[in-house]
């Protein structure tokens, strides 16, 4: 699969002797978590994994050469049962996903590393990533961190409706791929669908509300798209990648500098 991770920061490219030489108490390992799942008629199954790799790779390029940050190989398969029923979606159970993260965390700790960030770019994994970051902290004493998506990028030029409900295969994801790997975007196959409308507020929301309802993609989006990819452009993708990479790099630097907070 295509990678933007710099070779010198690709953990899997190291030998065990090179890993042995790393100052473990200062280093930060990044474990990407994503998915292989349907992304409408116009984006590839690997969209979440590609975006994770693209944003993380661009962020790692911004770090100084002295920063001991390394990207682990991604966990490509996620909890994607919301997309089951669409051919090509490959989903694992919550227990399997968490067991994989637990075992990787155990291996990281056994190698002597003390800092691990779980960097997730698939919404279906988010709650499990939160749980596992706490569990890895408790079981192995790892200093764990979580980071999600574009790390707080503002997406200037994005409509309020798309920002709120462009959940899946919408303008942002399409723009990212138009910038990073445009040959995989089928622009002639765009479809649009929203799970909710800002103009028609409701008490029960699909996400991020005081009361929510559970949903499966096939119930509400026949094409698999939740959002509107039609306004997406390479130019916006370029700008948004730059902003996201800058924020991700800043977060990684903060994680490197993080000190234990012990009550007086």
Image (cartoon, rainbow, N blue to C red):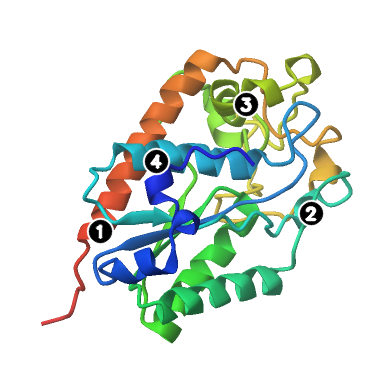
C-alpha distance separating marks 3 and 4? 18 Å
| Residue 66 drawn at (x, y percent) | 21, 50
Q: Secondary structure at mark 1?
A: helix
- Residues at marks 1 and 3 touching, judged by CB atoms closer than 8 Å: no
- At label 1, counting other C-alpha atoms closer than 10 Å, the crowd grade (few under 14, some 14-19, many 20 or more) is some
Q: Earlier in the sequence, mark 1 or mark 2?
A: 2
Among the 4 quarters of the image, the one containing residue 81 = bottom right
- At label 4, counting other C-alpha atoms closer than 10 Å, the crowd grade (few under 14, some 14-19, many 20 or more) is few
Quadrant in the picture for the C terminus: bottom left
Q: Earlier in the sequence, mark 1 or mark 3?
A: 3
Q: Earlier in the sequence, mark 2 or mark 4?
A: 2
Q: Which residue is farthest bottom? A: 139
Among the 4 quarters of the image, the one containing residue 91 = bottom right
Q: Which residue is mark 1?
A: 256
Which residue does the image show at 77% across and 53% down from the upper left? 82
Q: Which residue is mark 2?
A: 90
- Residues at marks 2 and 3 touching, judged by CB atoms closer than 8 Å: no
Q: Which residue is mark 3?
A: 174
- At label 3, counting other C-alpha atoms closer than 10 Å, the crowd grade (few under 14, some 14-19, many 20 or more) is many
Which residue does the image show at 62% across and 26% down from the upper left? 174
Q: Nearer the viewer, mark 2 or mark 3?
A: 2
Q: Earlier in the sequence, mark 2 or mark 3?
A: 2
Q: Which residue is mark 4?
A: 152
Q: Earlier in the sequence, mark 1 or mark 4?
A: 4
162 w.r.t. 51: above or below: above
Q: Secondary structure at mark 2?
A: loop
């Amino acid at each position: 699969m295509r990678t933007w991770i710099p070779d010198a920061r690709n953990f899997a490219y190291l030998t065990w002797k090179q890993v042995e030489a790393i100052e473990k108490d200062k280093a930060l390992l990044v474990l990407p978590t994503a998915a292989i799942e349907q992304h409408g008629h116009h984006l590839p199954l690997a969209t979440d994994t590609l975006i994770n790799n693209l944003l993380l790779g661009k962020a790692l390029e911004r770090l100084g050469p002295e920063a001991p940050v390394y990207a682990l190989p991604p966990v490509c398969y996620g909890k994607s049962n919301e997309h089951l029923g669409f051919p090509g979606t490959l989903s694992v159970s919550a227990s399997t996903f968490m067991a994989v993260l637990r075992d990787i965390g155990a291996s990281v700790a056994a190698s002597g590393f003390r800092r691990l960030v779980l960097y997730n770019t698939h919404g279906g994994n988010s709650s499990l990533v939160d749980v596992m970051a706490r569990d890895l902290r408790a079981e192995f004493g790892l200093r764990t961190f979580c980071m999600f998506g574009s790390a707080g990028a503002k997406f200037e030029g994005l409509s309020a409706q798309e920002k709120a409900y462009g959940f899946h295969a919408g303008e942002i994801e399409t723009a990212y791929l138009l910038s990073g790997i445009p040959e995989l975007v089928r622009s002639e196959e765009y479809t649009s669908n929203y799970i909710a409308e800002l103009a028609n507020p409701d008490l029960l929301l699909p996400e991020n509300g005081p009361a929510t309802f559970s949903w499966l993609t096939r119930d509400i989006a026949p094409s698999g798209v939740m959002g509107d990819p039609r306004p997406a452009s390479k130019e916006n993708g370029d700008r948004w990648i730059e902003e996201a990479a800058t924020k991700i790099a800043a977060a990684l630097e903060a994680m490197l500098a993080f000190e234990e907070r012990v009550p007086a």
